[in-house]
Amino acid sequence: MSSQKKRNFTIEAFKHRVVVDPKYADKTWKILEHAINEIYNHNASGLSFEELYRNAYNMVLHKFGEKLYSGLMTTMTSHLHEIANSIEVAQGEVFLDELNRKWTDNNKALQMIRDILMYMDRTFIPSTHRTPVYELGLNLWRSTVIHSLKIQPRLQGTLLELVHRERIGEGIDRGLMRNIIKMLLDLGSTVYQEDFEKTFLEESAAFYRGESQQFIESCDCGDYLKKAETRLNEEIERVSHYLDSKSEAKICNVVEKELIENHMHRLVHMENSGLVHMIVNDKYEDMGRMYCLFRRVPNGLPFIRDVMTSHIRETGKHLVTDPEKLKDPVDFVQRLLDEKDKLDKIIHTAFNNDKTFQNALNSSFEYFINLNPRSPEFISLFVDDKLRKGLKEVSEEDIEIVLDKVMMLFRYLQEKDVFEKYYKQHLAKRLLSGKTVSDDAERSLIVKLKTECGYQFTSKLEGMFTDMKTSQDTMQDFYDNMVGGEASDYPSLTVQVLTTGSWPTQASITCNLPVEILGVCDKFRTYYLGTHTGRRLSWQTNMGTADLKVTFGKGQKHELNVSTFQMCILMLFNNGDRLTYKEIEQATEIPAADLKRSLQSLACVKGKNVLRKEPMSKEVGEEDAFFFNEKFTSKLYKVKIGTVVAQKESEPEKQETRQRVEEDRKPQIEAAIVRIMKSRRVLDHNNIVAEVTKQLQVRFLPNPVVIKKRIESLIEREFLERDKVDRKLYRYLA
């Protein structure tokens, strides 16, 4: 038992011996307090940190942690009051330097104190839910120094004043600013926000509100945007140098709102410098800047996109409806292409290839190009001009570029079938006259059209090329089959045999061919019909050409390239030098309109006047007389005499083409209705119209009225029937 007591005594002995000393805690704290004072007074070099740590350890171990913690708070607070006083008396620019120096010293002191009291930090503080030593030091610094009534407003004012000075171009100590801002952040994000950021943003808004007003009154749009961009970049740079990174979005929002959002409408519509002025004058840099700045604010891009769209539509509408600009179809299309190139470059260069801007451009072009019902005809005439072999030699690469651009316009057309009608006519003339720039270019365009619209769109066009190739073989065979020297007895003849379904349907215009020609034509007819059974041949004299060898007054010889009609007229002058209009008309039986154009080409075009006309005038009248022009001269041996003809169709021709297009559409609309009804069985009127429109819009935009008529026709022919209850509901009859 005694040994047990002894054992108990030895366990308790050391503790009780220390604890019973009532002066132990005070003595130990005095040692630690002295050390803390020395640390604050920069005399820490003589201290034994190991001994101090052990003292603090023992105080906590022996339950004097509360005394140690409260003593620490009192001592630190006392020193911080002294520090606050020294900062308060600092005047002018020394104020921030003093604050920064004291803050640096305080941080070092805190770290040393934390090291000494590490055991308290690890055991006493978590168990009693107290604030850790370092954090306690920061809190006391915040409440005693930073939130001192004499320091807090002064600190905020000084920081804001330095920012303002930097904004107006003065230099400041950014390193010092960075340290002070970092101090606020180290004291907690709310300290930074409440003591600086909140007021900083408010004052920035006021500053930029005033500055934007000055700018808007004195600058044009381009200069204003440059200044706004500069200010935005300055604020971003300022954040990177000494503000919290989270402040970037906030200050940018302030600048964007005050400099951009609040003045959007005025900037975009600014007279002689706004967006439309930039577009017209190719101000790519200014537009790019506008795009980048406006994309930062709500509804900024939709707003400039709408203004751009409105301008494009207005400009385009003027372009396609101005009578002066419609006089030359080729120039008309070239203007469209130039406008598209210009706007494409703007969207690519200035608007960052923004898809929404590209879509707006496309919808605008589609809108105004279809305002002119003759756009399909004009685009085909433009293609004809580029693919027709002329004086200028064009490289294949250049032709491909032009064709790609034409296809871009073609996509905008709602009446693609109208283009097809004209294109077929123009292609036919190029092929038959041998004036196409190259078969490769022609086929390239057909491939593009097929890709865009499908095989059905181009099958007949491809048939035209097939006919041309077959005709070459036919002619070769025809001459190979002529007996002996028979071929030399007749003028040389080249015939193109055209399949009726593939080529443009035209009323067969005949004329009385010269006797010299009739013989070889009959020979060919006999040969062809003998080779191919069940076929009919019909001469299309309005589509042919001829080469005539002519000798003029002084024995001067020329070879004239003329139309078949012109050949028939000129051959009459082999039997007489003077013929009246009536005599020519009676002898050739060429229709009046074609006859007048042919005579006008032969007698009224300077440098091509192989005939003379009396009375001399630009127009051909029925009372005119014509003479062979013995005095005709030309520097060229071969002289091509074109037919004077309007590039565009005459009004009756236009009406006829339109009528043919409308007739061709009827079976296509009916076929679409039947396809839809066959799969759907029952459908209401509005849905049929929507489905038909969707199916056919690749070729043309069908008129709902016409669709209704085709439905009525199908009901009459018992393909469909109306529902007995709901008259707008249709059923398919199998």
Image (spheres, rainbow, N blue to C red):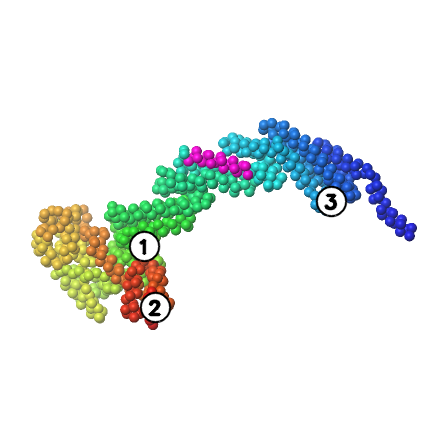
Q: In the rendered image, which quarter contains the C terminus?
A: bottom left
Are the two marked residues, 1 and 3, in contact with CB atoms closer than 8 angstroms? no
Residue drawn at (11%, 47%) of the image? 616
Q: Amino acid at mark 1?
A: Leu
- Residue at label 2? 725
Q: Most extreme residue toward the front, as rendered? A: 725
Residue 156: percent from left, percent from top: 57, 34
Quote the CA–CA distance across marks 2 and 3.
91 Å
Mark 2 Cα shell of 10 Å, populated few (<14), some (14-19), many (≥20)? few
In the figure, is residue 595 to the left or right of 441?
left
- Residue at label 3? 124
| Rendered position, 698 above or below 111 | below
First to last magenta residue range: 198-216
Front residue (pair 116, 690): 690
Q: Amino acid at mark 2?
A: Val
Front residue (pair 282, 39): 39
